[in-house]
Amino acid sequence: MMSDGASCREVLASLTSAAETVSGPRSTVSILVLDRNGLLRNGASPNLPDDFLVAIDGLKPCAEVGTCAAAAATGEIVVTPDFRADGKWTELRHLPLALGYLGAWSMPIKATDGGIVLGTFGTYFRDVREPTATEIAAVASLATTAAIAIECGELY
């Protein structure tokens, strides 16, 4: 897509669609990207409402907050099967619950050299559940492509 002139955001939006296809119709995927100040910003979240995106804009990576902020801080996959039962969501759980989401998981997007975290792939579920092995493998592959797009494109 990029060789055909697609923007970084268009590539990332395509990757979210691919992840949603793997995760099924009761899921929504978001890519957040770390800006120059180390804050999480929307890279591509075509199926999340603007008010939700505004509310989470500028989150600081923190191992004790949500799934995407925690994944960005730790560089590890973070799984929250049920927002209502996870203390990392105490301050934010009202946001996804208001949209009918009950759980989520996030995978860090790491630089192509395997180093720094560039952003996160977050998947929200309308059911209490964890990602399947197939979902994890697919998003891991998509995260590699996302890293290439983020490194080549200018987002923040």
Image (tube, rainbow, N blue to C red):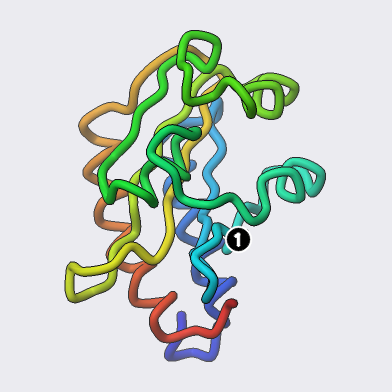
Q: Going 47% across and 37% down the picture, which residue do you hit?
A: 123
Quadrant of the frame with the C terminus = bottom right
Give the labeled residue for mark 1: 41
Which residue is nearer to you in this view: 22 or 83?
83
Q: SS for tag 1?
A: strand
Q: Going 70% across and 22% down the picture, which residue do you hit?
A: 94
Q: Going 41% across and 17% down the picture, which residue do you hit?
A: 81
Could you tell whether 41 is left or right of 141 in the image?
right
Disc 1 marks which amino acid? Arg
Q: How many marks?
A: 1
> In this view, which residue lies farthest toward the right?
51
Q: Quadrant of residue 52?
A: top right
User: Percent position (x, y) of residue 53?
Assistant: 71, 48
Q: Residues within 10 Å of mark 1 (few under 14, many from 20)?
A: many
Q: Quadrant of residue 10?
A: bottom right
User: Percent position (x, y) of residue 45?
Assistant: 62, 52
Which residue is nearer to you in this view: 145 or 43?
43
User: Percent position (x, y) of residue 73?
Assistant: 36, 49
In the image, is residue 82 above or below residue 71?
Answer: above
